Image (spheres, rainbow, N blue to C red):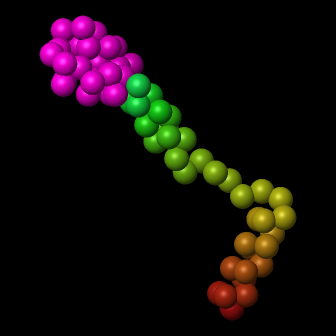
Amino acid sequence: MMVRTACFISTIFLPNPYRWFAMAGAVFLPYIAVVIANAGRETITGKNAIMNNQRRQITEG
């Protein structure tokens, strides 16, 4: 969040071409952080877990 805040504040002081990069960073950094934080947390439950387990047993044997 400090980087995002720095991006917002820097939009005031930076010249025009760099201002857009700072604004894009302030907008997209939270989205990227959430995607990375939630990556790999999917779990298999219910019918899919049973089917995957059966496939694994068939191919391992």
Q: Is residue 8 magenta?
A: yes
What residue lies at 68% left-to-right and 53% top-to-bottom?
A: 43
Q: In this view, does 32 lie to the left or right of 44?
A: left
- The outermost residue toward the right is 47
Q: In this view, does 22 lie above or below 41?
A: above
Task: From the image, give the main secondary structure of the stretch colored magenta.
Answer: helix
Q: Is residue 48 magenta?
A: no
Estimate the x, y position of residue 30 in percent, counting from the top left.
Answer: 44, 28
60 or 21: which is nearer to us? 21
The quarter of the picture where residue 58 lies is bottom right
Q: Can residue 60 be seen in this view?
A: yes
The quarter of the picture where residue 2 lies is top left
Q: In this view, does 29 lie to the left or right of 59?
A: left
The mark total stands at 0
44 or 60: which is nearer to us? 44
Q: Which stretch did the figure color magenta?
A: 1-26
- The outermost residue toward the front is 16
